[in-house]
Image: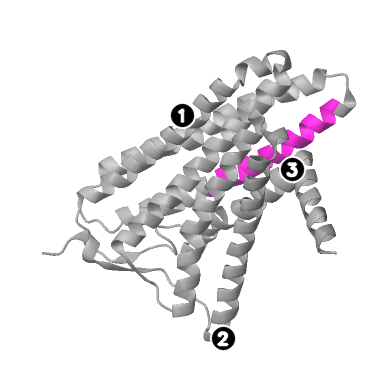
């Protein structure tokens, strides 16, 4: 008797010409190595420097961990399939990739929401910041964020295991919940309803919280008489808002494209890939190297290394 774990699935073709196989493999491998290097640099810098053991950096510490999960879920499988010119994947491997992809997506929105709340308290309630964002409260916030993400996403993917698949073609270039649900011929309304609930929780609630916090921050900045403090707050929060909106809208359009068959497959692929590729590259550069304290530590470390070599 066949079970889902015995099936080999076929993912959507990457449409790479034979002459482009090795350049694409090299580009994907170097991109993944760059992502790992940048995110590990940010992680190790925050972990090793006691001056950075502050609420903002503890929240930021979760971002490179999450980005490494997303990049590792996406890049290794892609570059191996490019080199082998084989788009087959076993059902268990596809299921694991889908689980990691959704943990990464939900984690990104949740962490960015937590960081927005931190900036809101720091700018709008500076006198109460240390009491609200105490070590105890901060640990509770971080544990709650990850428990929420892991619980809801595990349930989302667990609902798929109730069914036996009747198709073997993944309608995407990587595995995710919508593409796994499309392999099922039975009634999947519960999966669809729960998927909509997940979307509302992670994207809807995150958007509401971020909009509220940034309106409050903007009003506080407008009333602040110090031009330096105002410009610094707007610059920091402006960058954060751009990253959040980029992730929010790309993830939203990618999910919408899956639900409407009229949507062009190329559009769905473009939105899906951009969510997996750009945040892990840009986040360590924007939140890491652009942050003065982290940049100074990283540059100081490499200067010491260069001096010791000389």
Question: In the image, which disc is placed on residue 144?
Answer: 1
N-terminal label among 1 and 3: 1
The residue drawn where x is 55% and y is 46% is: 65
- Tell me which secondary structure the magenta stretch mostly adopts: helix
Q: What element carries label 3?
A: helix
**Residue drawn 53% across the image and 56% down it:** 71
Q: In the rendered image of this protein, does residue 207 appear above or below residue 45?
A: above
**Residue under the image location 64 percent in, 58 percent down:** 37
Q: Reply yes or no: does residue 242 show up in magenta.
A: yes
- Image quadrant where one finds the C terminus: bottom right
Whether residue 259 appears in this view of the structure is no
Q: Does the magenta stretch include residue 75?
A: no
Percent of width and height locating residue 176: 39, 54
Quarter of the image where one finds residue 309: bottom right
Residue drawn at (46%, 57%), measured in percent from left and top?
A: 73
Q: Is mark 2 on a helix, strand or loop?
A: helix
Q: Between disc 3 and disc 2, whose residue precedes?
A: 2
Question: What residue did someone put label 2 on?
Answer: 19
Instruction: Point out which mark residue 294 bears.
Output: 3
């Amino acid at each position: 008797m066949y079970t889902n774990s015995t099936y080999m699935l076929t993912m959507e073709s990457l449409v790479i010409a034979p002459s482009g196989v090795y350049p694409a493999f090299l580009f994907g491998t170097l991109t993944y190595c760059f992502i790992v290097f940048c995110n590990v640099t940010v992680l190790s810098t925050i972990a090793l420097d006691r001056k950075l053991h502050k609420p903002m950096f503890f929240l930021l510490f979760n971002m490179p961990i999450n980005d490494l999960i997303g990049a590792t879920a996406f890049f290794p499988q892609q570059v191996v399939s490019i080199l082998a010119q084989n788009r087959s994947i076993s059902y268990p491997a596809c299921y694991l990739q889908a689980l990691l992809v959704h943990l990464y997506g939900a984690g990104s929105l949740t962490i960015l929401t937590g960081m927005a709340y931190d900036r809101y308290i720091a700018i709008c309630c500076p006198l109460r910041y240390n009491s609200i964002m105490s070590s105890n409260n901060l640990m509770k916030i971080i544990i709650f964020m990850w428990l929420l993400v892991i619980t809801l996403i595990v349930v989302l993917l667990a609902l798929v295991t109730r069914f036996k698949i009747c198709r073997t073609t993944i309608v995407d270039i990587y595995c995710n919940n919508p593409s796994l649900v499309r392999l099922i011929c039975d009634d999947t309304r519960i999966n669809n309803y729960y998927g909509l609930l997940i979307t509302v929780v992670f994207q809807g609630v995150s958007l509401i919280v971020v909009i509220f916090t940034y309106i409050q921050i903007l009003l506080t900045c407008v009333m602040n008489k110090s031009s330096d403090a105002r410009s610094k707050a707007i610059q920091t929060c402006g960058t954060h808002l751009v990253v959040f909106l980029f992730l929010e809208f790309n993830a939203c359009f990618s999910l919408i494209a899956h639900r409407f068959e009229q949507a062009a497959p190329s559009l769905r692929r473009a939105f899906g890939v951009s969510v997996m590729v750009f945040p892990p590259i840009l986040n360590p550069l924007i939140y890491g190297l652009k942050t003065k304290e982290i940049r100074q530590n990283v540059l100081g470390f490499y200067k010491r290394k260069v001096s010791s070599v000389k």
